[in-house]
C-alpha cells in the first residue's frame, strides 16, 4: 500500500491542532507534523506576508480521499492549498505503522 503525505497551511496554531486532532482521531492520518512558517503570496491583487502553520499528514492511498474531504470541509481558508506527495521509500516498520494506524479510518470511508 502506498504511503502519502498531504500538505496544507492554516493561519493559527489552534486551527492546525484542530485539523490534526480530527485526522488522527478518525484514523485518517497516523500522525501530523505541525511547523510554523512565514508565507509570502499574492492574494486579492496584492503581495501578502503572513505567519502560518504547515501541516503534513502521514497517511495511505486508501485513507487519502476521506482525509482530503475532511480537510476541505473543516479548513478555515476559502482557497486552501491542499496537495499530496507520494512517499517513495520508507522503512518497513514505519510503513506498517502508518498502514495499521489508518486502516480502520480508510475502511470506514464511503466508497
Image: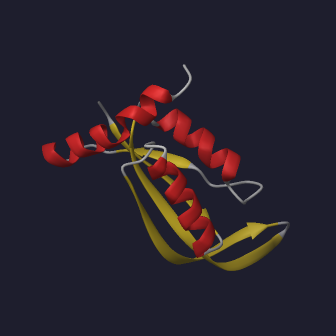
Percent coordinates x, y for residue 37 in the rendering: 53, 77
Q: Residue at x 48, y 45 (%)?
A: 84
Percent coordinates x, y for residue 89 in the rendering: 22, 45
Percent coordinates x, y for residue 77 in the rendering: 73, 59
Q: Residue at x 69, y 45 (%)?
A: 73
Farthest top residue in view:
111
Does 82 sit above or below residue 49?
above
- Report the front residue among 46 and 54: 54
Instruction: Answer with the quarter of the image where residue 9 lies.
Output: bottom right
Q: Quadrant of the C terminus?
A: top right
Is any part of residue 11 visible from this angle?
yes
Q: Quadrant of the N terminus?
A: top left
Instruction: Answer with the quarter of the image where residue 43 lies.
Output: bottom right
Q: Report the number of numbered marks.
A: 0
Q: Residue at x 61, y 44 (%)?
A: 70
Is any part of residue 91 visible from this angle?
no
- Report the front residue among 64 and 107: 107
Farthest left residue in view:
92
Percent coordinates x, y for residue 93 in the rendering: 15, 46
Horizontal side of residue 94 vs 10, given as left or right: left
Horizontal side of residue 9 vs 100, given as left or right: right
Q: Residue at x 63, y 74 (%)?
A: 12
Farthest right residue in view:
44
Amino acid at each position: 500500500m502506498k504511503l502519502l503525505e498531504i500538505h496544507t497551511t492554516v493561519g493559527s496554531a489552534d486551527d492546525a491542532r484542530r485539523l490534526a486532532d480530527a485526522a488522527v482521531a478518525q484514523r485518517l492520518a497516523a500522525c501530523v507534523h505541525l511547523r510554523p512558517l512565514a508565507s509570502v503570496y499574492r492574494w486579492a491583487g496584492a503581495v501578502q506576508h503572513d505567519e502560518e502553520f504547515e501541516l503534513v499528514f502521514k497517511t495511505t492511498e486508501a485513507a487519502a480521499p476521506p482525509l482530503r474531504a475532511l480537510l476541505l470541509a473543516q479548513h478555515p481558508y476559502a482557497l486552501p492549498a491542499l496537495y499530496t506527495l507520494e512517499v517513495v521509500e520508507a522503512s518497513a516498520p514505519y510503513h506498517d505503522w502508518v498502514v495499521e494506524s489508518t486502516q480502520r479510518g480508510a475502511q470506514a470511508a464511503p466508497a
